[in-house]
Each structure stands twice: as structure tokens, then as C-alpha cells.
Amino acid sequence: LIACWMLVLVGVQVAKEVPVSSCRALGATMMRGVMAGLPFGLLITYVFVGPESALIFKAWLCQSYVFDDSTASTVIFESYLQADPSMRCSDADFTNEDYDRLTKQATGFIIVYPVGCVLLYAALVLLSRKSGRGGAGYA
């Protein structure tokens, strides 16, 4: 959603300045488009980073159930994903390829979204300190 918004704003900015004579002018035009969409993009990431991060971490939230068979001599435990009780979680005695794939995808999303958003905010703060007050920075 955010990437689409940024692309639209970059396209609008480029369309406004159609006669582009050099790559440098095109780069500056694209940067103005990105800067125009940045406040909305930051607002969206800030509003959704908490709920989306919680959804990502639910990939490891499994509920254990006891299966007691009167004919068996041991008690059997099985874990199922709380968000989707039809998916059995992998454990020491059982491997579920679908669950393992889900946790690998969730690990990638953790790197991209919760960690990536924090790094984006930090980079923008550092860049804004350099450009604030005519390059003097904030104390």
C-alpha cells in the first residue's frame, strides 16, 4: 500500500515536469515525489506497525492439548496454532512442513516490517537532523 502510494506520487511529480533533460533532473523530480508522499507513508507504517507485528508473532503461538488414550500407557501432547487451530505445530516428535514454512515466512516479515520500520524511522531522523535549520542540525 505504501509502496503504491509512493509510486503514484513519484509518477505525478515526474508527469508535472515532463521535459526532463538529464538523469540528474529526473532523480531530483523523483525525490520530490517521494518527499511529497513521505508523511502519509510514515503515518500508515506508524499506525499499523503494532497490530501487524502482533499478527506476525502469532505464528509461534501454539496451544498444547492432551490426548489421553485409555489403551496407551503414555499421555500424548499435540500443539496447534492458536490463530488457525487446523494447523498442527512442529515439535520434537512431529514435523509439519506447512507450519515450518509459515514460521520461516514470519521470520522474514519480522526483518522487513518491525525491524525495517524502526530502521527507517532512525534513518529519517538522522537525515532530518542534518537538513534542519539550514544544515546546522538540532541540538
Image: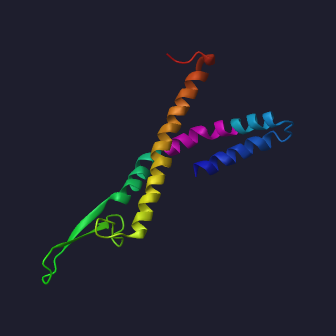
Residue at the location (67% across, 48% down)?
7
Compare residues 10 and 130 and report the one nearer the observer.
Answer: 130
- Is residue 76 found left or right of 122 in the rendered image? left
Compare residues 25 and 66 and report the one nearer the observer.
Answer: 66
Q: Quadrant of residue 59?
A: bottom left
Q: Position of residue 6 (x, y in %)?
A: 64, 45
Q: Position of residue 68 (x, y in %)?
A: 16, 77
Q: Quadrant of residue 85?
A: bottom left
Q: Position of residue 55 (x, y in %)?
A: 40, 55
Range of the magenta residues? Answer: 33-46
- Is residue 50 found left or right of 16 in the rendered image? left
Q: Is residue 15 something that shows in the picture? A: yes
Magenta region includes residue 62: no
Residue at the location (32% across, 59% down)?
61
The relative height of residue 129 versus residue 24 in the rendered view (above or below) is above
Q: Is residue 46 something that shows in the picture? A: no
Magenta region includes residue 38: yes
Prevalent SS, magenta region: helix
Judging from the image, the colouring scheme is rainbow
Tag count: 0
Q: Quadrant of residue 127?
A: top right
- Is residue 78 found left or right of 108 in the rendered image? left
Q: Position of residue 99 (x, y in %)?
A: 39, 66
- Is residue 56 found left or right of 71 in the rendered image? right
Q: Name the residue at the bottom extreme.
A: 71
Residue at the location (84% across, 36% down)?
22
Residue at the location (28% across, 69% down)?
93
